[in-house]
Image (cartoon, grey):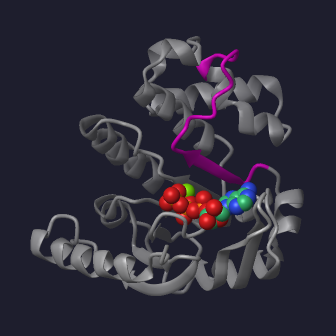
Amino acid sequence: MASDISNASPKLVVDHARKSFRQNNGVETTAIADLSFSVKSGEYVAIVGPTGAGKSVLLDCLLGLKHLDAGQIRIDGLPVENFVRDRKGHITRIFQEDRLLPWLSATDNAAFGLQIQGVAEAERRERAASWLDAVGLSAFKGALPRELSGGMRQRVNIARAFAPNPELVLLDEAFSALDDVTASRLRQDFKTLAQSQRTTFLIVTHSIDEAIFLANRILVFGAPARLMAEITVPPQAFEDRELSDRIKTEIRSLIVAGARRH
Ligand SMILES: Nc1ncnc2c1ncn2[C@@H]1O[C@H](COP(=O)(O)OP(=O)(O)OP(=O)(O)O)[C@@H](O)[C@H]1O
Ligand SMILES: [Mg+2]
């Protein structure tokens, strides 16, 4: 995985973050309780935790789509709102549901983030096309999303996420809507492409196997979001069955302990 991250400065700092919502019935739900962690530049960090732990809310806050009630998120030392405003398109995402625009071709969808960055059209198309080559969709550049399978659409999403040379890539259950075989092929391809980039990854997943396969470090969240444990993943963990089973058992018991009591 990414080399020489030990001396890297923090890319992302989440410092005593809190976020609650008032539901329609007036009841307040805490999504993020008191969350602090940091991620170094070039790290691959997975977040696992029970359902309702505020993982997706956290990613929305990282994208500047939602705002904390208290605490701070800093990216490269900047408050997240400033980072999102000044470095447009440098945080990209690959989510479970593909968010491709149905009326645009694979190339135009893959170029979408570049448009946000203000890249000129010719360069946009060239970079998007070369990323479609990289994800194995050379023959489908003109295809509309409805003409592609779920796995192929997720490949377009991967191309779209990488094309802007992002500084931070967020994954939220990126492979969980796919069958096992497609998902593991896509995870492998994603990892290979990711390693060719100098980017930082935050990977939210319910699959502990995926976390062990993709991440250098796993953060285990309780619900509402708080850090229950950080687990460093040794490079050989995915191949070493005994080791990965031990990590999985530890994480599963933390997740059970951290679930909401209702
Ligand atoms: N817009 C909203 N309005 C009210 N409550 C919300 C809103 N968004 C999220 N919540 C609440 O915040 C909590 C955290 O939700 P979130 O979607 O982040 O969980 P999650 O960890 O991503 O869960 P999962 O693993 O199931 O995807 C939940 O209790 C949810 O009901
Ligand atoms: Mg979620």
Q: Residues in magenta? A: 89-106
- Which residue corresponds to the image point at 47% horizontal and 47% vertical from the top-left? 174
In front of the other: 230 or 199: 230
In front of the other: 27 or 19: 27
Q: Is residue 13 left or right of residue 173?
A: right
* Quarter of the rendering containing residue 200: bottom right
The magenta stretch spans residue 34:
no
In front of the other: 125 or 242: 242
User: Is residue 150 placed above or below 201 in the rendered structure?
Assistant: above
Residue 48: give x, y in percent of width and height: 44, 69
User: Is residue 4 placed above or below 142 in the rendered structure?
Assistant: below
User: Is residue 28 placed above or below 131 in the rendered structure?
Assistant: below
Residue 210: give x, y in percent of width and height: 34, 58
- Which residue corresponds to the image point at 71% horizontal and 64% vertical from the top-left? 62
Instruction: Tell me which secondary structure the magenta stretch mostly adopts.
Output: loop
Q: Is residue 133 left or right of residue 93?
A: left
Q: Is residue 180 left or right of residue 1?
A: left
* Quarter of the rendering containing residue 177: top left
* Quarter of the rendering containing residue 72: bottom right
Residue 102: give x, y in percent of width and height: 66, 19
- Which residue corresponds to the image point at 54% horizontal and 86% vertical from the top-left? 7
Q: Is residue 27 left or right of residue 174?
A: right
- Which residue corresponds to the image point at 58% horizontal and 77% vertical from the top-left? 225
Quadrant position of ligand 1: bottom right
Residue 92: give x, y in percent of width and height: 66, 50
